[in-house]
Amino acid sequence: MNTVQIIFSVVYIALLISYLFSETSGNFKRRAVNKIAMASMFLIYAVVEFVRPLAGENGMLCVPSIEKCVIIAAFFFAWLGDVLLLWSFMKGGIAFIVSNLLFSVYLIRVIYSNRIPFVRMLPSVIIYVLLIGTVIALYKTKKIDFGKIGGAMVIYLASVTLHGSMSIGVLINVQQTHITLLCCGLILFMISDYFLTTDKFIHPAKWVLRCNSATYFSGLLLACLSMSYT
C-alpha cells in the first residue's frame, strides 16, 4: 500500500469506528453525516482510480473498458443505496439490487476472461443454493416474517448472495491482487446483509446492527482499494 492508500484507509476506518456508535445513538443527523461521509469516500476513491489510468501517453485519453464502467456503476449504486436507505428501506434496497447485479456482471466477466470452468465454480453454486434455499424455506413456512416488504426481501438477498457466493469461487481460482481484494470485499458485503436481515426481522440488537455496518463498510473499503490494482 502506498501513502495515499494508508491515509485513506486510516481516515475511513476512523469514520467506521465512529459510525458503530453514531448508528445506534438515536441522533439521526449525526448518523446520516457519518454514513454519507463514509459512502462518499469509497465512491470518490473508486472514481479517482477509475479516471486516473484514462490519461494515456501524450495527453491522449483512453477509452475505459466495459468492465470498468460496470464496476464504477456498481459503486455508484452502492453509494446511492446507502444514502436512500437513511430515509427509505425500499428505495435504498432497489439501488442496492442494481449495485449487486452490476457487481455480479463484473464477476461473470472475470470468470469468462480467466476461463474458469463451471466445475471449479461448484462451491459458489452450492453456497448460493444453500443460503437462498434456506431463506425461501424460512419465508414460505412463515418462520421469518418480512412484513410489508415480503418477497422483495427474498429477491434482495438473492441478488447480494449472487455476487457474494460467486466471489468465493473466483477467489479460489484467481490469484490477482485486485481480484482478491474485490472478492473479499464482496463476501463481507454479502455477510453484512445477513446481519441486517437478522436485525430487521429476527433479533433486533445493537451488536447485530454494528456487525452489519462493520462487515459492509469494511467490504466496500476492500472493494474500492481493489480499483488501484486493475
Image: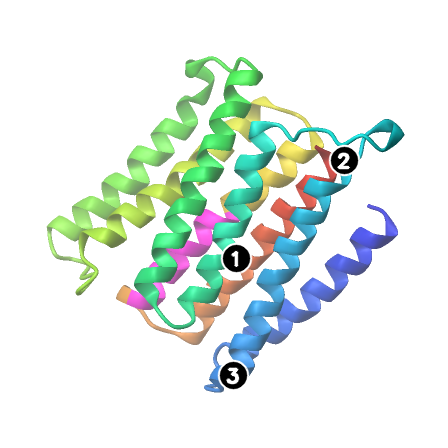
Sort mark 2 into few (<14), some (14-19) or many (20+) by Cα contacts within 10 Å: some
- Give the magenta part as a residue range: 188-200
Q: Mark 1 = which residue? A: 79
Secondary element under disc 1, as helix, strand or loop, is helix
Secondary element under disc 2, as helix, strand or loop, is helix
In this rendering, the label closer to the viewer, 2 or 3: 2
- The kind of secondary structure the magenta stretch mainly shows is helix
Secondary element under disc 3, as helix, strand or loop, is helix
- Is 190 covered by the magenta stretch? yes
Q: Mark 3 = which residue? A: 29
Residue located at (17% from left, 64% from top): 148
Quarter of the rendering containing residue 71: top right
Indicate the amino acid at tag 3: Lys
Q: Mark 2 = which residue? A: 53
On-image quarter of the N terminus: top right
Indicate the amino acid at tag 1: Trp
